[in-house]
Image: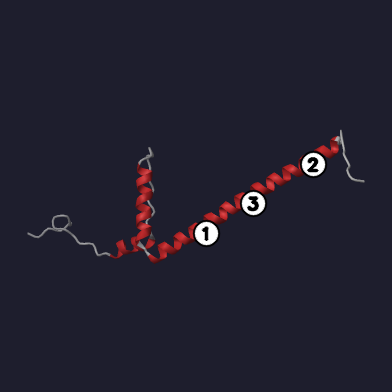
Amino acid sequence: MVKVETKGVDLPKSMKRAMARQAKAERERRTEVIAAEGEYQAAERLSQAAGVIAHEPGTLTLRTLQTLAEVATETTQTLVLPIPTRCSTRCRSVPRTRTSGRSGSRRS
């Protein structure tokens, strides 16, 4: 036997449905794999960025300012600024000075 040829094969509807389900499941699996790969790459880049920020603290301030500049171009009415706790702690530890004329007591 040298050659076998098949012509006009009709598959039952149940077989066609099973093949369609299998193809759909394979497409969904590929979609999930692609999404997971994208998340992994994003996590890697964030990890690299964290390393840069750890070595150069000024980069965090620059990134914050860049974000503010981007937000400022939008038509938002409320802007919430995150202030690191170390900054607010420093502000509380600065002694307040009273200016003359503003205190309640006057010297005559």
List the residue tagged with mark 1. Answer: 44
Q: Position of residue 18 (x, y in %)?
A: 81, 41
Name of the residue lying farthest toward the right: 1
Q: Is residue 5 above or below residue 92?
A: above
Q: Earlier in the sequence, mark 2 or mark 1?
A: 2
**Could you tell me how far apart the alpha carbons at marks 2 and 1 are, in whole angstroms?**
38 Å
Secondary structure beneath dot 2 equals helix
Name of the residue lying farthest toward the front: 2
**Could you tell me how far apart the alpha carbons at marks 3 and 1 are, in whole angstroms?**
16 Å
Secondary structure beneath dot 3 equals helix
List the residue tagged with mark 2. Answer: 19
Q: Amino acid at mark 2?
A: Met
Q: Amino acid at mark 3?
A: Val
Name of the residue lying farthest toward the left: 108
Side (left or right) of 32 relative to 49: right
Q: 70 or 24: which is nearer to us? A: 24
Check if mark 3's residue and mark 2's residue have beta carbons within 8 Å. Answer: no
Q: 14 or 81: which is nearer to us? A: 14
Q: Is residue 94 above or below residue 26?
A: below
Secondary structure beneath dot 1 equals helix
Side (left or right) of 104 relative to 31: left
Residue at image location 24% in from the left, 65% down from the top: 95
Give the quarter of the image for residue 25.
top right
List the residue tagged with mark 3. Answer: 33
Q: Residues within 10 Å of mark 2 (few under 14, many from 20)?
A: few
Side (left or right) of 21 relative to 86: right
Q: Position of residue 30 (x, y in %)?
A: 67, 48
